[in-house]
Image: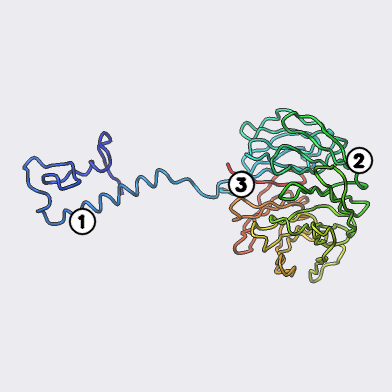
Amino acid sequence: MQIEMNKALPIHSRFRRHGRACRGHPCESPNGVDARDKRGHDTRYAISMTISAFLCSTLLVTPAGAYKAYVSNEKGNSITVLDTDKLEATATVKVGRRPRGIALNKDGSELYICAGDDDAIQLLDTKTLKITGKLPSGPDPELLALSPDGNIIYVSNENDNLVTLIDVKKKEMIGDIPVGVEPEGMAVSPNGKLLVNTSETTNMAHLIDTQSKEIVANILVDGRPRFAEFKQDGSELWVSSEVGGTVAVIDPVKRELKQKISFDIPAMSKEAIQPIGISFTRDGKRAFVALGPANRVAVIDAETKKIEKYLLVGQRVWHLAFTPDEKYLLTANGVSNDVSVIDVASLKVLKSIPVGAFPWGVVVAPQ
């Protein structure tokens, strides 16, 4: 339907009426006939107002679900940018050597990249897609986590058994915390008081007080812990163990292990089931766990700890990220060189998006 309007007039005046002005109608016809006496006037006026409201609302509507995702390609030495509305890659940016852990600042304007073989945290401007600088780090940074206020970055440095603290504004290192052998997983509690690091060889989750910067508990978990994630209410900490094939559920207040979640996929060996990335829904009722070379994501009832479903995705699924509206869950698939898109409501895999060589991490921010 095409509507022609006199653009010089306000919307309510563009529909000329045939009589003198009714109350609330500024227009009057040349013959001076009272519009209130004409049959159908009210109907026509109602229609015109409906069309006007529709046109105004159409101009104000912003497309929902339009987000950008960033994927680190470990062997491609690049970051792939995805449009989660079109579900396609829109750009590939060359970065430092062996990018793995990535994180966005609070407003999504800057991406922090662990360039492991460059021993640095690179800064990527998400508008220009240009590297703008770097932050100091220890050798071989692998994963990082931000304090809730975004002012401090905590980095696991795999080769020197340290967690490094970086002041974002000053762009300088402000401390180191000795941890176990081969530190990897990093997480910060929602209130910012507790920092967690997992050490792959020591097989522990180290709980660190962020004020004193001292370890307050060492919790033994199964072999090769790779990732840690808090529920958003801070009530539980989950740690994935790649070789052990389990997820440890930890009470961060009592600082003790509550239980372990194991996985069983028909016709698949236990050795192939290797938990890595963990993502919780905001309400804390459901968790998704990437199972590495099992090529599946486990859907878990986070309250009962029961497995609801296994979703077949790409090869060697590593890390996961929700879109902010939790419509989609994106998975980085390291061997098939793609990202799987999971519809969270239906628990179905919608498509795969080709990215760079050996995708490792994925984060999402509003456009």
For marks 1 and 3, the one nearer the N-term is: 1
Is 297 left, or right, of 343 in this rendering? right
Quadrant hosting residue 255:
bottom right
Residue at left offset 6%, top offset 42%: 31
Q: Name the residue under label 2.
A: 159
Residue at left offset 90%, top offset 45%: 179
Q: Residue 224 carries which label?
A: none
Q: What element carries label 2?
A: loop
Q: Give the residue type that dot 1 points to.
A: Thr
Residue at left offset 85%, top offset 41%: 163
Contact flag, marks 1 and 2 (Cβ < 8 Å): no
For marks 2 and 3, the one nearer the N-term is: 3
> Could you classify mark 3 by the number of other residues whose Cα lies within 10 Å: few (under 14), some (14-19), or many (20 or more)?
some
> Could you classify mark 1 by the number of other residues whose Cα lies within 10 Å: few (under 14), some (14-19), or many (20 or more)?
few
Residue 38 shows in the view: yes
Q: Which mark is residue 43?
A: 1
Q: In this view, does 145 lie above or below 235?
A: above
Contact flag, marks 1 and 3 (Cβ < 8 Å): no
Residue 165, x across and y down, in percent: 81, 37
Q: Give the residue type that dot 2 points to.
A: Asn
Total labels: the figure holds: 3
Colour setting: rainbow
Between tags 1 and 3, which lies in front?
Answer: 1
Between tags 2 and 3, which lies in front?
Answer: 2
Q: Give the residue type that dot 3 points to.
A: Glu
In space, the residues marked 1 and 2 are separated at their CA atoms by 77 Å
Quadrant hosting residue 300:
bottom right
